[in-house]
Image (spheres, helix red, strand yellow):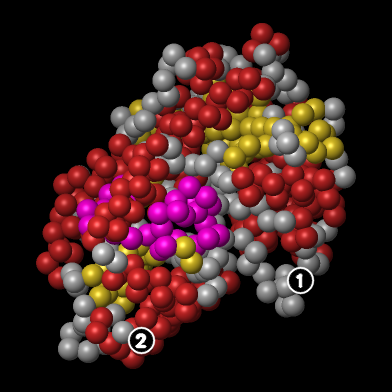
Amino acid sequence: MTAVNPASVAGRLLSSCSPIIVANRAPLTLEEADPILGTPERLVKGSGGLVSAMSTLAQATKAIWVAAARDGADEALAARADENGHVALEDSGASYAISFVHPSKEAYHLYYNRISNPLLWFIHHYLWDLSREPVIDSRTEHAWRAGYVEVNRLFAQRVVEEARAAARPPLIFFQDYQLYLAPEMVRRELPSASLSHFIHVPWPNPAYWRILRSEVREAILTGLLANDVVGFHTHQDVRNFLVTCEDLLHTGVDFGQAMVYFAGRKVHVHAYPLGIDVAEMRAMAKAEKTQEWFDRFAQSRCEQIILRVDRTDLSKNIVRGFLAYERMLEAHYELHGKVQFIAYLQETRQNIDDYRSYLGSVLSAVARINRRFSSGGWMPIHLEIESNIHKAVSLYRQYDVLLVNPIYDGMNLVAKEGPVCNERDGVLVLSENAGAHEELGEFALTVNPFDVDQTAEALYLALAMEPAEKAARADRLRDVVERNDVSDWISAQLSDLAMLATPLHLWR
Ligand code: G6P
């Protein structure tokens, strides 16, 4: 675990406040014991960059983490709450607590499967084919009111309860696109609380927000502007957010200071590029279980490996990655039998039609390409769909090329985790639309994620790159990732809050 220096501004703020993290997903989920496999019950880390980032904060600060009980597994964990409604957790040797909110099944379904993911996530990542979709109608309106507004209300209510019960002034950290309305609801009850909201996804330009009805997009913006600080991964997102506030809310915006004036308050908008916990990642790379997977793969590996590690999300652009690889194989017969594309994927959001059909497209692309090129025991693509962090890290250690080609992505931590674990001076092929590109682009091979010919060429250049150039690039990638660790991300946000938010003596 990476700690925040207690003597720093950030550390002093933390020791005088009670941090409350508010995110849809709890950091850990309960995996039941399996009597057939003989595996014991265990707590596993949830997926996505948000969980890894905020777990570090929770571990460092003993925060309360407010999350939704999303399913039976979360309910089983929630049943262990003490009389204050807190489930105590041990995570990486540190303790903190989860405070679950309990939306009805129907409300959660509308909030998660109708609004947050198929609508807001699609807007954030420019995923709509606008000539056909989305169709906004009374069902959208119902899902918004009975799902999104309702679940945000439940979150806000719980946050207010936790803040009022806290021993010290609360520092409230809202996370992501599922909770845009909660800050305004909390602000109404706790006018002098310190609120920040970090958005882990890209912020699109204002024209794309016009997909939503004006009341809905305005509610999103006014909800967010109830915070003291709104954080993004990149400067591009900050710019897009400021323009959106100006265009859609007609409110005062200071582009130089990155500030929005709204309802008599100043809201600071800032880029905090998320880093990884480098020490934890390195420890994971050395772990015994990782080594076991490493040895297994090492025995059967091809001469060169192209790797991708992703959730099966439409924004990750998995199918175009395979198409690019197919074109590379068409052009370079000499690589047949010598290279293998390993796609280590994690199933995601399978209650949503578009996600299920996207997974279908991924599977059929793999089957088709394997049918087309397999020969003499060589299979061009090796696909695994599961979630095992040790296995993923063992693959990070041995790739020659890491393909990270999202259509759009907030940050993309795979692009940072891979280079710090890799032992072969592997080359990063990186989409210009991944947030990570702002920091890592110079030392990666940049691709336009839509251009499969260019991506094919980049894959080939990466495989053929001279060892000295590979080593120099890998060195610089590691260096950039090391210099902006997750603890820097946390400290930067805390320092800003310490300067900007309500002075502590005015609290209550
Ligand atoms: C992304 C989002 C997170 C989300 C994660 C996993 O990283 O920014 O908010 O938690 O994906 O998605 P899920 O829907 O499974 O929580």
Residue pictured at 47% horizontal, 17% vertical: 8
Q: Which residue lies under the disc numbered 2?
A: 331
Q: Nearer the viewer, residue 300 or 437?
A: 437
Q: Nearer the viewer, residue 202 or 29?
A: 202
Name which quarter of the figure residue 255 lies in: top right
Comparing marks 2 and 1, which lies closer to the viewer? 2
Residue 127 placement (x, y as % from top left):
63, 67
Name which quarter of the figure residue 328 lies in: bottom left
* Quadrant (top left, top right, bottom left, bottom right) of the N terminus: top left
Residue pictured at 29% horizontal, 70% vertical: 463
Q: Secondary structure at mark 1?
A: loop
Residue 206 placement (x, y as % from top left):
76, 55
Asked if residue 355 shows in the view, the reply is yes
247 vs 462, left or right, is: right
The amino acid marked with disc number 2 is: Ala
Residue 414 placement (x, y as % from top left):
40, 54
Residue 135 image label: 1
